[in-house]
Amino acid sequence: MAERHLVPAAGGAGLVLKRGERLRIIDTEGGQTGDLLAYSLDGSERLSNGRSFDYGGRIYLSTGDVLWSDRSNPMLTIVEDQVGRHDFLYAPCSLEMYRIQYGVKDHHPNCHDNLCAALRELGIEPHPLPTAFNVFMNVEVTPDGRLVIVPPRSRAGDAIVLRAETDLAVAISSCPASTCNGGIPARPLAIEVLPG
């Protein structure tokens, strides 16, 4: 049985994922979103939403879809998905986002800082940070092109499983933005690494 680790509420975690290993991300309480980033171990390739859209032909990714790098190499394949709705459009929340969108002047926990810290612990200098794959985040695109964040579909215990297609440095943040979590404060996520 895989060892389970918690990503703290509004916090982050990093890990090395070897080719063939699978990462299970679990919404332990339901309705919690998370940001996922992947880099090659040498930092030369980063997760790319644009390439993933180019090669997959859609913006809503689920079982069987591949997450590609900015150098057009497969990084992760979604092999199991109990939720079926994730976002790959929104950038990680940041201090600037809280200031501009919500008028927050003091420090606020944010995915950008969580992801950067986790990647630096793995020896990766993350700047510029790409768009994260936002697990469990539910975003609708209206006919006029507006983006609408609605409550996540995930329930307690729901998970997504991604297989590494190459050795990767992976960072995950439990998103602090209540807007993305159905108006509820951040809660932890759980992660497990499963053998290939």
Image (cartoon, rainbow, N blue to C red):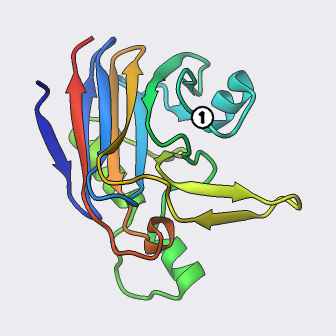
Location of residue 149 (image quadrant):
bottom right
Location of residue 125 (image quadrant):
top left
Residue in the picture at 59% in, 80% down: 101
Locate residue 68 relative to residue 35 in the image: left or right.
Answer: right
In which quadrant of the rendered image does the C terminus lie? Answer: top left
Locate residue 183 relative to residue 28 in the image: left or right.
Answer: right
Residue in the picture at 42% in, 56% down: 33
Under circle 1, the secondary element is loop
Question: Height in image: 138 above or below 94?
Answer: above
Q: Position of residue 174 (x, y in %)?
A: 33, 57
Q: Nearer the viewer, residue 166 or 44?
A: 166
Question: Height in image: 62 above or below 114?
Answer: above
Q: Position of residue 138 (x, y in %)?
A: 57, 55
Question: Height in image: 88 above or below 78?
Answer: below
Residue in the picture at 31% in, 22% down: 22
Q: Position of residue 52 (x, y in %)?
A: 64, 29
In which quadrant of the rendered image does the N terminus lie? Answer: top left
Location of residue 185 (image quadrant):
bottom left
Looking at the rendered structure, the kind of residue marked 1 is: Leu
Residue tagged 1:
61
Mark 1 is surrounded, within 10 Å at the Cα level, by few (under 14), some (14 to 19) or many (20 or more) other residues, namely many
Locate residue 12 relative to residue 181 in the image: left or right.
Answer: left
